[in-house]
Image: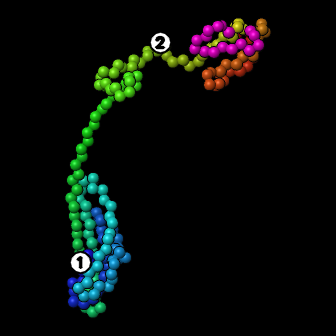
Amino acid sequence: LVDNGGTDSMSVIALDRVVDGKGPASLLGLLETNPLSLGENTRLVDVVYHDFCLSGDFTYVLDGEGDPPDGPGCQDQEQYVQANDPECSISLNLTCFDQSAPAGVNRACEDIPRIEIPQCECSQCAKQVYFRYTGAACPSGTVGYDCTDVGGPLAAEGGEIYVSASGGVQFFSGTVAFDS
C-alpha cells in the first residue's frame, strides 16, 4: 500500500524494489492511482517467485519517493525479511520382486536367488575366428549356427561361399579354394 500521509497531494515519482540483493526494479507502472490526493492511498501487486526450500533469508526492500506540487519531496523505505530454514526429510522403502513369481507376489530382496555370472572358459577374448571350407555338405542338426547348401558341395577347384550372422549381417562373400 502506498499512502499519502502529507499535507497536500503528491505524485509518486520513484517506487523501486530489491529482492535478495537483486535490483532495483521500478514498480511505478503497477500503481493503480498516481498522483495521490491528500489522505488517499493506492495499492500495487508485485509477484515475486522465491524458492523457500533454499536456506537463507528472503529479503524484499521497497523504496519510494513522493513529490508534492509545492514543498520538499519525501522518501520512505519498507523492508520485509523472512528467515528460511527448510527441513529435509526423506523416507525410502525398497521392495524387490521376482519376475518369474506370480503377479503381486513379492519377496524380501535377500530371498531372491542370486543370478550367477557365467564364467568364461577362455583365457582371453576372441579377436579372430577362422573357418576351414572343406567342400563337404552341411551337417544335419547344426547347433549355434546355420548352414545352407546352395548348389551342392564345393567342387575340387573351389567355389562361392557366403558367411552371414543371424539378422543377415554378411561377414564374407567370395570364392575360396577347396580345403582352405
Figure check: 82 above or below 170: below
Asked whether residue 49 is in view, the answer is yes
Residue 23's place in the image compared with 130, above or below, is: below
Q: Secondary structure at mark 1?
A: strand
Residue at x-position 69% and y-position 14%: 148
- Which region of the structure is painted magenta? 138-153
- Outermost residue, front direction? 103
The residue type indicated by label 1 comes to Asp
The circle on residue 76 is: 1
Q: Is residue 86 above or below residue 101?
A: below
Kind of residue at badge 2: Glu
Q: Is residue 74 visible?
A: no
The residue that appears at 65% across and 21% down in the rendered structure is 164
* Residue at the disc numbered 2: 121
Tell me the quarter of the picture where residue 178 sits: top right
Q: Which mark is residue 33?
A: none
Label 2 packing within 10 angstroms: few (<14), some (14-19), many (20+): few
Mark 2: which secondary structure? loop
Please identify the dominant SS of the magenta region. Answer: loop
Task: Place residue 106 in its image quadrant.
Answer: top left
35 or 169: nearer the eye? 35
Query: How many neighbours does mark 1 have within 10 angstroms: few (below 14), some (14-19), or many (20 or more)?
Result: few
Q: Position of residue 102 (x, y in %)?
A: 38, 24
Mark 2 or mark 1: which comes first in sequence?
1
64 to 100, vertically: above or below: below
Q: Position of residue 83 (x, y in %)?
A: 21, 58
